[in-house]
Image (cartoon, rainbow, N blue to C red):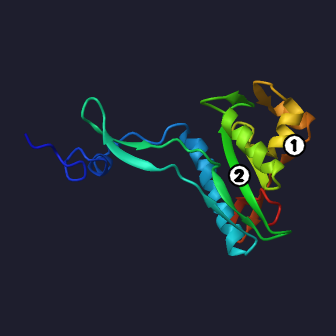
Amino acid sequence: MVQDNLFTSNKSPLNQFMSGDEPKKRGGGSREGLEFENEIERACFMYQTLKLACIERRQPKAFLGRGKDNKPFVGYAKKTGSDFVGGLLVPEKNTLYLEVKSTVGGSIDMWQENSGIKRHQLEIMKWLEECGFICIFLWEIRESKLVYKFTPLELINGVGGSKKLTIHNCEELKFQKVLRKKQGVNFYWDFLNLL
């Protein structure tokens, strides 16, 4: 029996997408959360255009496979780093690691393994910050249209081992609110305060 080639069969991920029957998508993020990542990516492009920073989005490695039911799927390897990484050129040259989070409501899980601000993200970003790199978390609260910016050490020193971060915590700890600024005809989340 001849097995269908994953790339040429009518059931290939590309053919499924073209027919409207999309293959399995990257897990872990809502459409709105991924939209926020896209907005941050546009801000990174603006920083690069203005020669202020060169920051790139890191995507998990994709692979194609077949499930138990022999249906094709697109899988993604577990991403071990931050969402964005790059170099700042002003005010001084340094490496930047940026993790982007988005929730509907005014709280986000912390120290979990599969959601929110994950344990391994906090531990790695804390270690990098202690080594002298610039590490930033951006948290978008969609219903309030707010974005907070904080470092791993600010977060850990402020809320410690708490299982949730709330808007109240952010206000109490005076975490910086990120503003949307107009540059040309577009608006950008100016998370580096450079626009």
Mark 1 or mark 2, earlier in chain: 2
Between residues 30 and 4, which one lies in front from this camera angle? 4
Q: How many marks?
A: 2
**Residue 62 image point, x, y percent:** 43, 49
Q: Left or right: 12 with respect to 107?
A: left
**Residue 41 image point, x, y percent:** 63, 58
Quarter of the image for the N terminus: give it. Answer: top left
Q: Residue 98 — which label?
A: 2
Is 90 situated above or below 73?
below
Can residue 79 be seen here? The reply is yes
**Residue 171 image point, x, y percent:** 89, 36
Q: Left or right: 137 with respect to 33?
A: right
Q: Nearer the viewer, mark 1 or mark 2?
A: 2
Between residues 112 and 21, which one lies in front from this camera angle? 112
Which residue sits at x=33%, y=48%? Answer: 17
**Residue 182 image point, x, y percent:** 75, 64
Q: Quadrant of residue 190?
A: bottom right
Residue where numbered disc 1 is placed: 175
Q: Which kind of residue does numbered mark 2 sit on? A: Leu
Which residue sits at x=70%, y=36%? Answer: 143
Q: Which kind of residue does numbered mark 1 sit on? A: Phe
Q: Please tell me whether mark 2 sits on a helix, a strand or a loop.
A: strand
Q: Left or right: 132 with respect to 172?
A: left
